[in-house]
Image (cartoon, coloured by chain):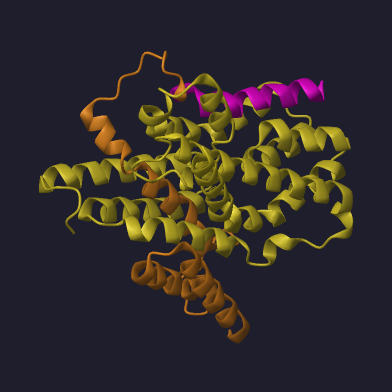
Amino acid sequence: MRGNNRALKIATLRGVLDMLPLSLAVLPWGILFGSLAVQRGFSWLEAQLFSGIIFGGAVQIVTVELIADNSSLFTVLFTAFIISSRHFLYGLSLRERLSPQPLRWRLGLGFLLTDELFALSGHRRAYIGKLRLYYGLAAGGSFYLAWNFWTFIGIVAGASLPDLTDLGLDFAIAATFIALVVPGIKSLATLAAVVTAATASVFFTLWHFELGLICSALLAMIVGFTVNKLRGSPEDSL
Amino acid sequence: MTLLTILLLACITFGTRYLFLEGRLPVRLGPNLRLMLSYSGPSVLAAILTPILLVRNDQLFLSISNPYLWGAGAAITAAYKTGNIYWTIGVGMLVFIATGQLI
């Protein structure tokens, strides 16, 4: 029993630590959101609720602007839906491993399933077994706390702080994702998928295409799939 | 009214995240779809990270004076050699900051 508790503690700590670079790297955007919401006339409570229950960086920043500009409710919700559509892909990818889990785990991890938590869910056995569930909960939960804390700082100190989004902390996000992607490239198919996603996402970003992220990812998955089928080879041979 | 909007937005982010985690949803993943989904992780991450490196102020920034490229080059090398997340971020950040100062 004691050893079991110890293992759970270690899994929890590892989840928090693995997420730490991302939790810190989103500081400028958390602060940006908090101060933006207050400046656009939202109450402190409303601003904190955005991070507390919506919990989605891009969705929050875009919808705060839309609501403040008196856009129609339909426009606000539809835009949020478009930005959130990538979550369908995350849910589908984790479906086999998470759907057999008890409801409380599905609700909890589902609520926490941001880009960042999905980034840490790539392990072949992710969410299989109690330890890996705790790992995910700790990673997602610590990111949730960090995001809400940065929001709070933005709400309180907002206007008096300089814009921190130019500091280059976005490079930390890129570096973390590089650390998660590169060691996993063990086949020509995966390499082809990564190159496709990288290229397509840059074009879509330059074109301001709102569905760019999900379309790049889908295109890349099709390319990876096709290369795998054409080579007819096992997964791990580059 | 604002509270209601926030609540509806929360339903959208949570709903899109939770939908496919629900086992009772009648969706079966065939072997082809499963193979395709096995590429979703690296694909999504590459699609998020590359524009951070290459797009600055709505323009393609493919130049040796772009510190993001130097940092990314170092991070990719470190990730390939060590496979360790902290080494990758550490080396990448160091080169990113150093080249940012020099350029």
Q: Position of residue A168 (x, y in %)?
A: 63, 67
Q: Is residue B92 covered in magenta?
A: no
Shown colour of chain B: orange
Q: Position of residue A109 (x, y in %)?
A: 54, 32
**Residue A228 falls left or right of residue A152:** left
Q: Is residue A224 visible?
A: yes
Residue ranking furthest to the bottom: B102
**Residue A222 falls left or right of residue A147:** left
Q: Is residue B16 visible?
A: no
Between A65 and B36, the residue placed more toward the observer is B36
Between B85 and A70, the residue placed more toward the observer is B85
The quarter holding residue A42 reads: top right
**Residue B9 falls left or right of residue A157:** left
The quarter holding residue A81 reads: top right
Count of residue discs:
0
Q: Against A38, is A180 above or below?
A: below
Picture residue at 70% right of the left edge, 30% below the top: A53
Q: Against B61, is A102 above or below?
A: above
Q: Position of residue B62 (x, y in %)?
A: 46, 70
Picture residue at 25% right of the left edge, 37% below the top: B35
Between B56 and A35, the residue placed more toward the observer is A35
Q: Which region of the structure is painted magenta?
A: B1-20
Q: Position of residue B52 (x, y in %)?
A: 53, 59
Picture residue at 42% right of the left edge, 73% below the top: B73
Task: State which quarter of the image contains the C terminus of chain A.
Answer: bottom left
Shown colour of chain A: yellow
